[in-house]
Image (cartoon, rainbow, N blue to C red):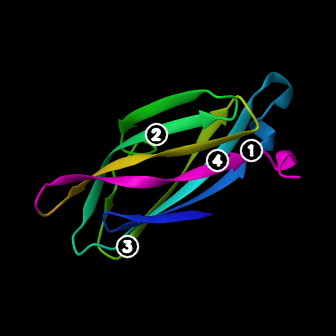
Amino acid sequence: MTSKISGGVTITVETFYQQEYSNPLNGEFMFAYKITLENNNVFPVKLLRRHWHIYDSNGTMREVEGEGVVGVQPVIEPGKSYQYISGCNLRSEMGKMLGTYLLENIHNKKQFNISIPSFEMHAPFKMN
């Protein structure tokens, strides 16, 4: 598990290898990640956009950008948290992701970026 505080929001990430959706013989490795965002600010925030950098251990990098997360733009009240689960496919047994969320302070409509901590994904058989 990885955590970071950025812009008054605690971001915690936990990853899971998805063996049933992976096919190592074809270079397909599926991972799920659970992200929890806890708003430590005194104002509510709305998650507007995400921007990911995804790295495979084979040296490739790709970017994913879009509105919200898993089809929603959640509003997180002060002292509350929002959690979602998503997935990432890699072409190698190991990789990492990092990125940013664009948030909006609901009270004054100011937008700001927060950093998503870098987190690693490893197929369990590579950890021996």
Q: Quadrant of the N terminus?
A: bottom right
Image disc number at residue 54: none
Where disc 2 sits, the SS reads strand
Query: Residue farthest to the front?
Result: 59
Query: Are the two marked residues, 4 and 1, in contact with CB atoms closer than 8 angstroms?
Result: yes
Q: Quadrant of residue 15?
A: bottom right
From the image, tell me which residue sits under label 2: 52
Decide: few, some or many residues near mark 4? Use Cα within 10 Å; few <14, some 14-19, many ≥20. some
Q: In the image, residue 78 lies at what x, y percent?
A: 29, 73
Name the residue: 34% across, 77% down: 79
Q: Nearer the viewer, residue 102 or 34?
A: 102
Amino acid found under the numbered disc labelled 1: Gln
Q: Work out how far the residue at label 2 is from the one at label 3, CA to CA, in angstroms.
A: 24 Å
Q: Is residue 106 above or below residue 23?
A: below
Image disc number at residue 80: 3
Counting the numbered discs, the total is 4
Decide: few, some or many residues near mark 3? Use Cα within 10 Å; few <14, some 14-19, many ≥20. few
In the image, 66: left or right of 122?
left
Q: Earlier in the sequence, mark 3 or mark 1?
A: 1
Amino acid found under the numbered disc labelled 4: Ala
Residue 37 forms part of the magenta stretch: no
What range of the chain is rendered magenta? 108-128
Q: Is residue 81 above or below residue 58?
A: below
Query: Are the two marked residues, 3 and 1, in contact with CB atoms closer than 8 angstroms?
Result: no
Q: Work out how far the residue at label 2 is from the one at label 4, CA to CA, in angstroms.
A: 15 Å
Image disc number at residue 32: 4
